Image (tube, grey):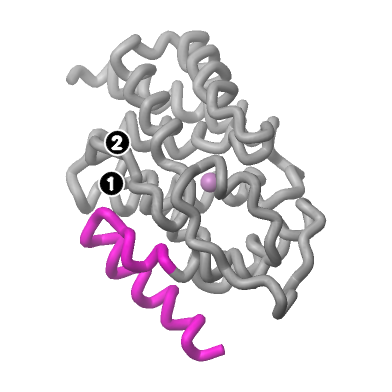
Amino acid sequence: MGVTAQMNKQAIIRKIAGVVREKLEGEGSGHDWWHIYRVWKVACQIGKEEGADMFVVELTALLHDIADWKLHDGDDTVGPKVVRNVLFEYGVSEDIISHVCEVIVAMSFKGANVKSKVKTLEGKVVQDADRLDAIGAIGIARTFTYGGHKGRTIYDPKQKPVMHRTKEEYIKDEGSTINHFYQKLLLLKNRMNTQTAKQIAKSRHSLWKNI
Ligand code: NI
């Protein structure tokens, strides 16, 4: 790839980071700009280590929560439409647009017993980076923030955690925030795709065992 193309890619990433920051700065459910920023930076770290296409990794990380289906009543067609428009506007090629959109639809957690459909290395890298932000101290803070946003109780001993088998069951779940740890967060350490993320997950996860 020529120097100019490389410069263009950097410029596109910078501009898209600006768009995302403007849209998600101050977002109150735990999917705010600084979540995106952490996922972006960790995705860069993992992606370089794993030899992924960094343009796809960076674009996907930046845009992965721009229209999250969890915040649109489970509608997972909103995200790709918004993402497609943004990338098209900045002149990104069709094959990269489809790759990024496919990953964004496939990467989110959809229930303890629902298998992830992320296929490419780039998708695996960004999925790992996003999941790492749900583990450890930041993960705890984000989970209670999301619970508050959804009006959930912190803990109710009468409710037992449910291991969801479908995305529909997972979306309908109105259990406590503590249940969410058992239904998702504590499972993530063993669901990392890449070796690099497995290492990072191990140290973040160990914080939980010490509480
Ligand atoms: Ni995210």
Examine the rendered structure and indicate whether residue 208 appears above or below residue 14: below
Magenta span contains residue 47: no
Decide if residue 149 is on the left or right side of residue 160.
right
Q: x, y percentage for residue 125?
A: 31, 46
The residue located at (36%, 53%) in the rendering is 128
Decide if residue 51 is on the left or right side of residue 45.
left
Q: x, y percentage for residue 132?
A: 44, 60
Check disc 2 and report the residue beneath it.
Answer: 54
What numbered label is drawn on residue 205? none
What's drawn in magenta, residue-wise?
A: 187-211
Q: Which of the 4 image quarters holds residue 205?
A: bottom left
Q: Nearer the viewer, residue 125 or 187?
A: 187
The residue located at (38%, 77%) in the rendering is 203
Q: Nearer the viewer, residue 196 or 16?
A: 196
Check disc 1 and report the residue beneath it.
Answer: 47
Q: x, y percentage for residue 104?
A: 44, 33
Examine the rendered structure and indicate whether residue 142 appears above or below residue 46: below
Q: Earlier in the sequence, mark 2 or mark 1?
A: 1
